[in-house]
Amino acid sequence: MIRRYEDRDFDQIHAIINDGASAYKGVIPSDRWTEPYMPAEELRREIGDGVEFWVYEVDGALAGTMGIQPVEDVTLIRHAYVRTADRRRGIGALLLAHLRKLATAPVLIGTWADAVWAIRFYEKHGFRAVSQETKEILLRRYWSIPERQVETSVVLADAKWWERNLSV
């Protein structure tokens, strides 16, 4: 079942994010890896900044989480993670489809450039990577991330965004 995050879910989604992010260890630049990957304070800040999390629940336990955040004229998909033990069951695809239905503007997704499995996942669901130049513009405009993360990330856009930005 997919449902909106509730305050009582905080510890579980924090655990899911850090468990799921373990796939990045040794893949993303070592200067971008931290233990834990996302501290609780950062997750609280993301929620406070308007990231609306949704969760996938199975028998009372959460198996995945994904956030959506409207920013200016786009919708960002943020912090998409499935618990390691629950991967390859379609949970990420279900969460992504649900959030896309909620999006009222073109959807953008940022991820690590070296996370080829994540990029393939989004491409499989109709997203396409933007150019290097456009990526830098988008990451600086819509995300609040360090410059080093801008350098080491990619941005993927949905068909709505591409239709609106054919020349990019």
Image (cartoon, rainbow, N blue to C red):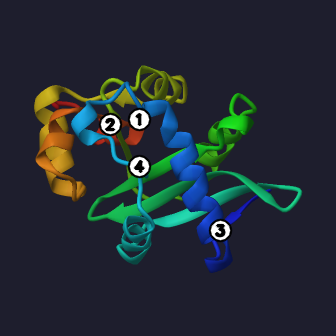
Q: Nearer the viewer, residue 162 or 134?
A: 134
Q: Position of residue 51 (x, y in %)?
A: 43, 66
Residue drawn at x 52%, y 49% as measured from the top left: 18
Q: Position of residue 93 (x, y in %)?
A: 64, 37
Closer to viewer: mark 4 or mark 2? 4
Q: Is residue 138 left or right of residue 61?
A: left
Three-letter code for the amino acid on which mark 1 is drawn: Ala
| Disc 2 packing (10 Å; few <14; some 14–19; many ≥20) | few
Q: Earlier in the sequence, mark 4 or mark 3?
A: 3
Q: Earlier in the sequence, mark 3 or mark 1?
A: 3
Instruction: Give how far apart the Cα atoms at labels 4 and 3 are.
Output: 23 Å
| Disc 1 packing (10 Å; few <14; some 14–19; many ≥20) | few
Contact between marks 4 and 2 (CB within 8 A): the answer is no
Q: Earlier in the sequence, mark 3 or mark 2?
A: 3
Disc number placed over residue 4 in the picture, else none: 3
Return the residue at label 2: 163
Return the residue at label 4: 37
Return the residue at label 1: 159
Instruction: Give how far apart the Cα atoms at labels 2 and 1 are.
Output: 6 Å
Q: Is residue 28 left or right of residue 123?
A: left
Residue drawn at x 63%, y 40% as measured from the top left: 92
Q: Earlier in the sequence, mark 4 or mark 1?
A: 4
| Quadrant of the rendering where the C terminus is positioned | top left
Element under disc 3: strand
Instruction: Give how far apart the Cα atoms at labels 4 and 2 are.
Output: 35 Å
Q: Position of residue 137 (x, y in %)?
A: 12, 44
Element under disc 1: helix
| Disc 4 packing (10 Å; few <14; some 14–19; many ≥20) | some
Q: Nearer the viewer, residue 16 or 81?
A: 16
| Quadrant of the rendering where the N terminus is positioned | bottom right
Instruction: Give how far apart the Cα atoms at labels 3 and 1 are.
Output: 25 Å
Contact between marks 4 and 1 (CB within 8 A): the answer is no
